[in-house]
Image (tube, rainbow, N blue to C red):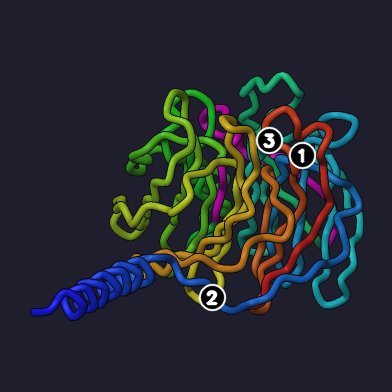
Amino acid sequence: MDKTRGTSLLSGFAVNLSLLAWLAGAMTAPVAAEGRWRSGAPVPTPRSEIAVAELGGRIYVAGGIGWLGTTGAFEVYDPKRDRWRALASLPVPLHHLGMAAAGNRIYVTGGYRDIFFTPDSKSAWAYDPASDRWRPIADMPAPRAAHRMAAIGGKLYVVGGVGPDPRALMVYDPAKDAWDRTSAPLPTAREHLAVAVVNAKLFVIGGRWRGRGNLAVIEVYDPARDGWTRKADMPTPRGGHTAGALGGRIHVTGGEEFSPSRTFAAHEVFDPKADRWTVFDPLPTARHGLGSAAVNGRWYVIGGGTGAGAKTFVTLTGAVEIFTP
C-alpha cells in the first residue's frame, strides 16, 4: 500500500469513528420536544413557597412568602379570561404548605407560620368555593411543612416534608374527617419535593434531604396495593420545583440548589409507560418555590422566587408562564 493511500484510509477511518461517536451521543442525549411557552396575567400578590391546586377548571394559589413576610393571600385564576380574583384569605398566614382539591373543596395542610421555619403546624382546613369560606378539619397526626398533598380516589395524601416521622404517608378521608398513617411509608425521605398523579398513582419526584442535597429519585405509590416502586431518576436533581400531569406524562420544571447558588429553568418530561425522561424547551423564567396546574391541555407555572435560598425574599415574582405541548 502506498503512503498516500494509507493516509487517506486512516483519515477516513478517523472520520467514521467520529461520526459513530456523534451518533451514539445523539441517540442517548435527551431530545428537545415541540411546544411553546407564553405569559399569562401575573399573580396579583407576588410570592414564593406557595401552594397551587386546580378545581373546576380554575387555579387556586394559597399562602407563601410575600414582600412583608408570610402571607395568607388566596387568589383564583380563570384561564379562559386570563384573570385573577382575590378570595377569602387563609385562616392563618402560611408558607411551604400543602394544598389539593377533592370533591368540590380545596384542602390546606401544615406549613410554616413564620419566617423562622418552625415545623409546628398540623392544622388543616377546607375551603368551599360556593360560599368563599374556610372551616377547620381534623388536625394531621403530626406537623408537616415543605411537603406536598395530592388527591386520589377522593382521599388526600400528604407526602414528604419536614416534621416528626417525615417518611410517614398521611391519608385524609373527607367523608370521615379522619386521618390514617398506616400506609406504607415513603422509601426516601425528602422535603421541597414535587408530586403528580397519573392513573391513580402518586408520583413523588426529587426534593432534597439533610446531608444529601438535591435528589433525582422518583418513587411511585399505588394505593390499590399499598406499595411503592422506583422509576428512572430525573435528569436534573432538584428541590423547590413543581410538577404537573399533562396528557399522561409528567412535566417538571423550576427548583434550586445552594452550591452553586442558582435556580433552574430546566423543563423535563417523564413518560410513565416508557419509564423515560425527555428534555423540553426550558421555563422562560428560572425560579423556585413555585407551583403549577394543568387545565385543558395547558400547563400553568406560577409564582416563585428567581433567587435561590434566602434570596427568595428579594426576588419574588408573580409570573405566570403557560406551556402548550
> Amino acid type of disc 3?
Ala
The residue tagged 2 is 33
Count of numbered labels shown in the rendering: 3
Q: In percent of the image, x 71 and y 40: which residue is there?
A: 49
Q: Quadrant of residue 252?
A: bottom right
Between 10 and 26, the one nearer to me in the picture: 10
Residue 193 placed where, x, y %? 53, 43
Point out the tag, 3 or 2, that comes first from the N-terminus. 2
Residue 26 placed where, x, y %? 38, 71
Q: In percent of the image, x 86 and y 55: which residue is there?
A: 43
Callout 3: helix, strand or loop? loop
Visible in this render: residue 56?
A: no
Checking the image for residue 308, the label placed there is: 3
**In front: mark 1 or mark 3?**
3
Find the distance from the CA under tag 1 to the CA under tag 2: 32 Å
Find the distance from the CA under tag 1 to the CA under tag 3: 15 Å
The residue tagged 1 is 64
Residue 110 placed where, x, y %? 64, 34
Residue sitting farthest toward the left? 1
Q: Quadrant of residue 113?
A: top right
Mark 1 vs 3: CB contact within 8 A:
no
